[in-house]
Amino acid sequence: MNNQKIFLGLLSGAAVGYWLNSDHGRKVRSDAYRVTTDASKDLQSKISAQSTVLKNKAQHLLNQGVSSVKSLYDKVEATGDEMRDEIGSAYESGKNKARAKINTLDAY
């Protein structure tokens, strides 16, 4: 049984090899090579274009992220400055009230 499979495989390979070496077989090989080469170039072109589109989208998203983080940082910084000013004003106001109260008590 195994010998028959081997013989059938060899016979099939020889037939295909003979056919591929004929004029018709060479034309089929040439056409197949041309089609696959064209398809490969087309695929490379499409992949390159999509790569550029994805790169641009990623850069846009990165820029948006950086802008959002900077905006948030600026807001936090401004809020911190406002809080510092309010605390300073409240401190000064409390200090002045305490000084006035002490002066009132000293007057007695």
Image: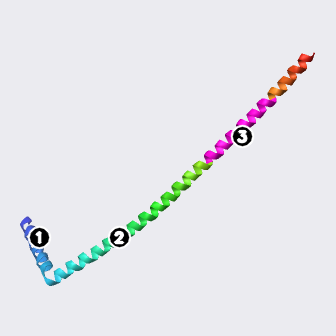
Q: How is the image coloured?
A: rainbow
Nearest to the observer: residue 98 or residue 13: 98
Q: Quadrant of residue 7?
A: bottom left
Which mark is on residue 86? none
How many angstroms separate mark 2 from mark 1 (CA)?
35 Å
How many angstroms separate mark 3 from mark 1 (CA)?
87 Å
Q: Is residue 43 magenta?
A: no
Decide which of tag 2 and tag 1 comes sooner along the chain. Answer: 1
Label 3 belongs to which residue? 82
Examine the rendered structure and indicate whether residue 98 appears above or below residue 37: above
- Residue for point 10% across, 72% down: 8
Label 1 belongs to which residue? 9
Decide which of tag 3 and tag 1 comes sooner along the chain. Answer: 1
SS for dot 1: helix
Q: Is residue 6 left or right of residue 94?
A: left
Q: Amino acid at mark 3?
A: Glu
Decide which of tag 2 and tag 3 comes sooner along the chain. Answer: 2
Which mark is on residue 43? 2
**Span highlighted in magenta in the image:** 72-93
Q: Nearer the viewer, mark 3 or mark 1?
A: 3
Examine the rendered structure and indicate whether residue 35 appears above or below residue 71: below
Q: Is residue 82 left or right of residue 26?
A: right
Q: Quadrant of residue 91?
A: top right
Q: Quadrant of residue 11?
A: bottom left
- Residue for point 81% across, 31% down: 93
